[in-house]
Structures are given as structure tokens and as C-alpha cells.
Image (cartoon, helix red, strand yellow):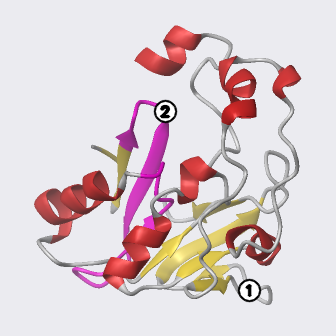
Amino acid sequence: MDTVAAGVTQLRIQRFVNVYFVDAGTPGDWVLVDTGLPGSERAIRAAAAAELYGPGVGPQAIVLTHGHLDHLGAALELTTGWHVPVLVHSLERPYVTAQALHPPRDPTVGGSLAFMSRFFPTQLPDLRDVVQELPLDTDAVPFLMGWRWLHVPGHAPDQISLFRDAERTLLGGDAFATTDHDSVPAVLLE
């Protein structure tokens, strides 16, 4: 795990998927940003319990930057165990509640992940019982004082990033990449 800013800890899962533990302002209160791939819940719970907040201390909420499988893969298991809401952009609701499928992936855009995307599942976990939309009348992030959400469509029409003005900290989701996706070794070994 890496501290990327005051009160923000990054956990990298399987080399190319990131989740963030963000302190919510009150000691012991925190929010999870993204949930990694399916099966990531054990690593996330262990990191939260063992290294950051203590055994059994769950977050106030889970915020998804967007609804691709590598960002919401463990959301259902985590929210069920922690009994917390999953916050998404309103455009994301149909995808995370099994009402719609994301547009087909384009494996011709280049890069190893784009090529492999044709094999990714299109049906996502159904979060209809726990999902809540971020309020559209404000950019404040519920449970996270000092943070605001930014709608950054492109990679996904519903993608958001989280920004904290105080330290100019950005949690970009997939708004940009730091791994060379044209290189399979870079994706697998970085």
C-alpha cells in the first residue's frame, strides 16, 4: 500500500487495478473508492482492518469512479458485509443495476487490455439494492468533506474523478493511465 496524499492510501490489486481508502475527516471514518476485480474483497478487508482502521471497521460508503468490472468487481460482496451504500453517477445506474449493458468494447483501439477486452464479461453485478446516485445539484462527495466529484466522460460515459482542492489531489479512476497498455509485460509486471 502507498500513501498518495494526506488521508489517502492506495492499494494496488493484481498490478494494474487500484482502490483507495480515503479518510472522511472524523477519526475512524473513511470511504472506499472503487473495489477492484471480483475476488478482491479479502485483500481490501485485510488492508482496511490490519493496516488502516482496525478489525471490523467498515467505510461510510463506497464510491465507484465508473462501472467497469475492474472498479466494481468486489462491490456487492463488500457492501453486503459492511451494509453501506455504493455511490455512482446517475448515468451509471442502469449499468450497475442490470438494466443495461455497457457499450461494446472496441478491441481495435490498441493495447493489450483493449485486445483482451473482448473476453471480459458484459454482465455486471446487480447493485440495485445498495446503489445511490451522487447528487447532481452539488459536486460535494457525500461522506467526504473537502472532496468534490468531477464528471469526466470519455473512457466511460459515466466516469467521475474525485478532487480535493486543499492538496490538489485527484483520484482519476481511468481518466489517465500510467501503465503502457501496448505492452503485455508492462501490464503484467509493473
Question: Which quarter of the rendering shows the C terminus?
Answer: top left
Question: Could you tell me which residue is drawn at 51 percent across and 65 percent down?
Answer: 166
Query: With 62 as the anchor, is 29 left or right in this view?
Result: left
User: Which quadrant of the figure has residue 111?
Assistant: top right
Tag 2 residue = 16
Question: Could you tell me which residue is drawn at 57 percent across and 23 percent down?
Answer: 179
- What span is colored magenta in the figure? 12-38
**176 shown above or below 19:** above
User: Which quadrant of the figure has residue 28?
Assistant: bottom left
Magenta run includes residue 3: no
Give the x, y percent position of residue 100.
83, 67
Question: Disc 2, disc 1: CB below 8 Å?
Answer: no
Inspect the image, locate mark 1, and give the three-letter code of the amino acid beneath it. Answer: Thr
Tag 1 residue = 138
**69 shown above or below 120:** below
Give the x, y percent position of residue 77.
40, 69
Can see residue 190? no
Q: Secondary structure at mark 1?
A: loop
Query: With 26 as the anchor, is 63 left or right in this view?
Result: right
Question: Could you tell me which residue is drawn at 29 percent across and 85 percent down?
Answer: 26
Inspect the image, locate mark 2, and give the three-letter code of the amino acid beneath it. Answer: Phe
Mark before the other along the chain sequence, 2 or 1: 2
Query: With 10 as the anchor, is 116 left or right in this view?
Result: right
Dot 1: few (<14), some (14–19), or many (≥20) neighbours within 10 Å?
few
Q: CA distance from mark 2 to mark 1?
A: 31 Å
Question: Could you tell me which residue is drawn at 67 percent across and 70 percent down?
Answer: 149
